[in-house]
Every structure is written in structure tokens, then in C-alpha cells.
Image (cartoon, rainbow, N blue to C red):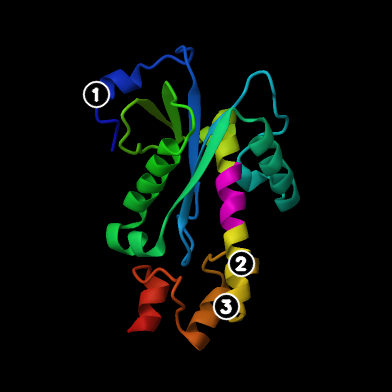
């Protein structure tokens, strides 16, 4: 997938110092067996630097929480969006992820001149966009987006745990841990499980 107005060649030769606002985009929750996939888009303010931005997976939960609040307070603008379990099952996880990313960009208060997306696939956008492999570890605005998406989804899992405590969502965040798989076998699937993911599909047979 790529921006509908630009060819691969144009996107491959984009320069980093393009004038105008740049948004970073990343997602959280592609791998879990339950819950939405979450994407965030962030435009950082050069006049309000944020120290310690990094790939959210390399940070402690406490550090992510603190950075989440700092990003929300200091960024020029930011947006968090989801694609639901139903959309994941209908579209597949890749297309649902791209949909959440597009929603996150469209939710920005300011229109970016260019969008930098973590990974190797791009959502359909009506602006310049570039996919950057491991961008969450190398591009601060993508790192910020990864933190927003991760914290948002983790908080969602904690809330789901209160509704379905038998599955342990607050601990494993929906991933297919031994605890989660055992709970699936014992209790079946809840409405927030992804029915097209194999471990869930197997208990629904």
C-alpha cells in the first residue's frame, strides 16, 4: 500500500529536510489474540524537546506512562485511533492496521506535509509518506507515536481485564502466553477475542 498520489520512485527519493510539518506514525497490537489494533500519529514541537524517546518496547511501563503524558502535553498535535476486533476479522490484521494508521493521521488537528510510518507498508494517504523499517527506534516522532499507541492499548487491556478477569488481560495484554492459552481452553473466547486468529479459531470449532 502507498500514498495514492505518489509513485514508489517518488517516495523512495524523499528528502528528510522537506519543509513543513512532519508526522510520525506507529501501531501497537498486531500480534495479540484479542482487542483492537491501535495506531498513533504525532507531530513533535522542536521548541519543546522530549528526552528519552525510544521504541516503546524497550521502555519500562512506568517510563512509557510518563512519556505518554509528556508527549500529549508538548507535541504540536497527536491523534490515537483504533481498528476494532470486528474490522480485524473482516479485513485481516494488516489491512486493519493500515486503516487505524490512516484514521490516526486523519485525526490530527494540523495537516502534515509528510508522514513517516514505522515498518515497510503505508496506509493510503493524500500526502507524501515514507515507510521506515525500525523507525520507532531511529525517528523521534515515530518513537513518540509508538509510545502513545502502546500505552493506549495497554490501558484498554487493563479495562478489559475488569470485565473478563478470568483471562488475565492486564498481565499478558492479549498476547498468546501460556496463561492466556490455558484460559482460552478453559473458558472459551470472549467477544473481544479475534476469531480469525488460530488459537481463538481452534476453541470456537
Q: Nearer the viewer, mark 1 or mark 3?
A: 3
- The quadrant the N terminus occupies is top left
* Distance CA(mark 2)–CA(mark 1): 42 Å
Mark 1–mark 3 distance (CA, rounded to whole Å) = 46 Å
What residue is drawn where x is 27% and y is 25%? 8
Earlier residue among tags 1 and 3: 1
First in sequence, mark 2 or 1: give its number: 1
Q: Main secondary structure of the magenta part?
A: helix
Residue 170 in magenta stretch:
no
**SS at mark 2?**
helix
Whether residue 163 is visible here, answered yes or no, is: yes
Res. 172 visible in picture: no
Q: Position of residue 14 (x, y in %)?
A: 38, 17
Q: Nearer the N terminus, badge 2 or badge 3?
A: 2
Residue reaching furthest to the bottom: 186
User: Mark number for residue 159?
Assistant: 2
**Disc number lying in front (2 or 1):** 2
Q: Are circles 2 and 1 on residues that touch, CB within 8 Å?
A: no
Q: Is residue 154 left or right of residue 40?
A: right
Mark 1 residue element: loop
What residue does disc 3 label? 164
Amino acid at each position: 500500500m502507498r500514498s495514492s498520489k505518489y509513485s514508489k520512485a517518488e517516495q523512495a527519493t524523499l528528502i528528510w529536510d522537506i519543509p513543513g510539518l512532519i508526522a510520525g506514525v506507529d501501531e501497537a497490537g498486531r500480534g495479540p489474540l484479542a482487542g483492537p489494533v491501535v495506531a498513533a500519529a504525532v507531530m513533535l514541537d522542536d521548541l519543546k524537546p522530549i528526552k528519552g524517546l525510544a521504541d516503546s518496547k524497550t521502555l519500562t511501563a512506568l517510563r512509557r506512562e510518563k512519556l505518554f503524558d509528556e508527549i500529549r502535553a508538548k507535541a504540536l498535535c497527536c491523534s490515537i485511533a483504533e481498528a476494532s476486533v470486528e474490522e480485524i476479522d473482516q479485513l485481516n490484521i494488516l489491512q486493519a492496521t493500515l486503516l487505524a494508521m490512516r484514521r490516526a493521521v486523519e485525526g490530527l488537528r494540523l495537516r502534515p506535509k509528510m508522514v513517516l510510518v514505522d515498518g515497510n507498508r503505508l496506509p493510503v494517504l493524500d500526502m507524501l509518506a515514507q515507510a521506515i523499517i525500525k523507525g520507532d527506534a531511529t525517528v523521534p516522532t515515530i518513537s513518540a507515536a509508538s509510545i502513545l499507541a502502546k500505552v493506549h492499548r495497554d490501558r484498554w487491556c487493563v479495562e478489559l481485564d475488569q470485565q473478563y478477569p478470568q483471562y488475565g488481560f492486564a498481565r499478558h495484554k492479549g498476547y498468546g502466553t501460556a496463561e492466556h492459552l490455558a484460559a482460552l481452553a478453559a473458558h472459551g473466547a470472549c467477544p473481544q477475542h479475534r476469531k480469525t486468529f488460530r488459537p481463538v479459531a481452534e476453541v470456537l470449532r
